[in-house]
Image: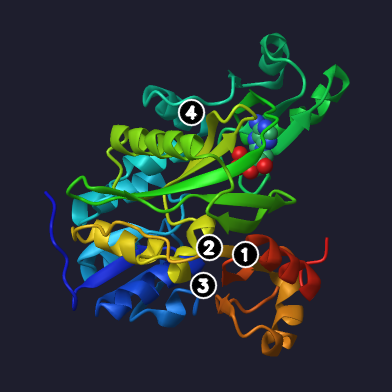
């Protein structure tokens, strides 16, 4: 049963990271109250929430407390215990359900769901053990990428195998269970499509960004992606097919590889607002966070419109000090810091969005700032 959630009511968020924080800030503009469940006190979301429940995510008393205080519950990260979330759907209003999380937590289920929607993924095989991998890889050409089915992120839980001698290096991945081995894709670009779907079945797609990774972590998103119109149309159609096939509610980021011939392959799905959509806060008429709140509250979605070209750059732990000392030089940069206490190396601490008429000039300005050395 869908419900309309109104200002003054409370949105519960599982997870206290930056995505929850930006969701909460968007929701608070419209007068919603926020409750957050996170193991840490004063988490990025906790700092802007009305109610903080500080407990492990699988703590059943804490989940019940969240259910009690919330009129609707959403999540900001995907590694939630599916059984706990399923239980929550019985005692609270969780319009996103628990099934999507179950699919995206496992690369094998995820690839199957993408294919079921008629969308291509890289050729792959599944293997439960290293012995099975050795038997089955004959059907793949080198190089290929072995990835754990569960628990990998930002390049963790992956191993590129360039030749038969290197295969042994993938053995350790099986400590975390089943794996997939997929063809290494010589892509020309990585893009992501952030699609949002409300409880009434309406969908909206943000302008598509081009993603540049460094050490497997998103470094920059350039919007619009510098790729042909036909590819963008294919990418949107694919994202819509996946979202509708999964009956997704909320936000789904569909990460894709663009091939030299302009075709696309889907790499993976993230069932939540996505780092590559942060630019939408300044560069569009509806940020991914505002739209996410509309989607779960049963409000009509707004058709996204790009006001300006944009470049988003991530601020990791090592970039915080150089950035903050240079704020005075860059009045046009929108600076977002997430309120995390320790600026650990490689930890996502914030991002910068720059609206621009000239992407190349802005990329040069970012390089010349010296904040993000090669
Ligand atoms: P993932 O954890 O699957 O998102 O992978 C992280 C990054 O590794 C991707 O954004 C790509 O840059 C790279 N990558 C992953 N899978 C492949 C592949 N099959 N071929 C080429 N590059 C890949």
User: Closer to the camera: disc 4 or disc 2?
Assistant: 2
Residue located beneath label 2 in the image? 309
**Side of 274 relative to 67 (left or right):** right
For the residue pair 197 and 165, the one nearer the viewer reads as 197
x, y percentage for residue 178?
A: 59, 27
Q: Earlier in the sequence, mark 1 or mark 3?
A: 3
Q: Badges 4 and 1: C-beta atoms under 8 Å apart?
A: no
Residue located beneath label 4 in the image? 111
CA distance separating discs 4 and 1: 37 Å
State whether residue 16 appears in this view.
Answer: no
x, y percentage for residue 265?
A: 54, 30
In the rendered image, the residue lying farthest to the bottom is 328
CA distance separating discs 1 and 3: 41 Å
Residue neighbourhood size for the residue with mark 2, other residues' Cα within 10 Å, grouped as few (<14), some (14–19), many (≥20): some
Residue located beneath label 1 in the image? 358
**Colour setup of the view:** rainbow
Q: Badges 3 and 2: C-beta atoms under 8 Å apart?
A: no
| Above-or-below relation of 88 to 72 | above
Q: Earlier in the sequence, mark 4 or mark 1?
A: 4
Q: Where, quadrant-wise, is the C terminus in this rendering? A: bottom right
Q: Residue at x 40, y 28 (%)?
A: 113
Q: Earlier in the sequence, mark 4 or mark 2?
A: 4
Q: Badges 1 and 3: C-beta atoms under 8 Å apart?
A: no
CA distance separating discs 3 and 4: 33 Å
User: Closer to the camera: disc 2 or disc 1?
Assistant: 1
What element does badge 4 sit on?
helix
Q: Earlier in the sequence, mark 2 or mark 1?
A: 2
* Mark 4 C-beta to ligand 1 under 8 Å: no
Q: Badges 2 and 1: C-beta atoms under 8 Å apart?
A: yes
Q: Residue at x 82, y 66 (%)?
A: 373
Which quarter holds ligand 1? top right
For the residue pair 216 and 119, the one nearer the viewer reads as 119
């Amino acid at each position: 049963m869908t419900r309309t959630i109104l200002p003054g009511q409370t949105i519960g968020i599982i997870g206290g990271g930056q995505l929850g924080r930006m969701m909460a800030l968007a929701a608070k503009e419209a007068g919603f109250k926020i409750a957050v469940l996170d193991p840490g006190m004063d988490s990025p979301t906790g700092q802007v929430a009305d109610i903080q429940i500080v407990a492990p995510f699988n703590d059943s008393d804490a989940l019940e407390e969240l259910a009690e205080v919330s009129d609707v519950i959403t999540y900001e990260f995907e590694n939630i215990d599916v059984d706990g979330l399923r239980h929550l759907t019985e005692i609270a209003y969780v319009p996103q359900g628990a099934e999507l999380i179950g699919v995206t937590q496992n690369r094998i289920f995820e690839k199957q769901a993408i294919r079921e929607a008629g969308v291509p993924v890289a050729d792959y095989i599944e293997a439960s053990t290293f012995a099975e991998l050795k038997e089955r890889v004959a059907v793949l050409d080198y190089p290929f990428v072995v990835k754990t089915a569960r628990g990998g992120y930002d390049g963790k839980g992956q191993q590129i195998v360039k030749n038969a001698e290197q295969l042994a290096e993938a053995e350790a991945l099986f400590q975390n269970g089943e794996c997939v081995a997929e063809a290494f894709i010589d892509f020309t670009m990585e893009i992501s499509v952030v699609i949002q779907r409300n409880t009434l079945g309406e969908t909206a797609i943000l302008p598509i960004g081009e993603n540049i990774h460094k050490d497997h972590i998103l470094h920059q998103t350039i919007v619009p992606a510098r790729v042909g119109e036909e590819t963008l149309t294919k990418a949107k159609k694919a994202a819509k097919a996946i979202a509708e096939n999964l009956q997704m509610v909320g936000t789904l980021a569909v990460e894709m590889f663009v091939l030299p011939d302009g075709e696309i392959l889907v790499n993976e799905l993230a069932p939540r607002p996505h780092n590559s959509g942060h630019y939408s806060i300044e560069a569009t008429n509806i940020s991914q966070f505002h739209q996410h709140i509309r989607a779960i509250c049963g409000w009509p979605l707004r058709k996204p419109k790009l006001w300006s070209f944009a470049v988003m750059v991530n601020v990791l732990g090592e970039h915080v000090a150089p950035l903050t000392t240079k704020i005075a030089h860059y009045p046009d940069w929108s600076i977002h810091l997430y309120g995390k206490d320790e600026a650990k190396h490689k930890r996502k601490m914030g991002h910068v969005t720059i609206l621009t008429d000239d992407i190349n000039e802005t990329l040069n300005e970012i390089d010349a700032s010296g904040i993000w050395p090669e």
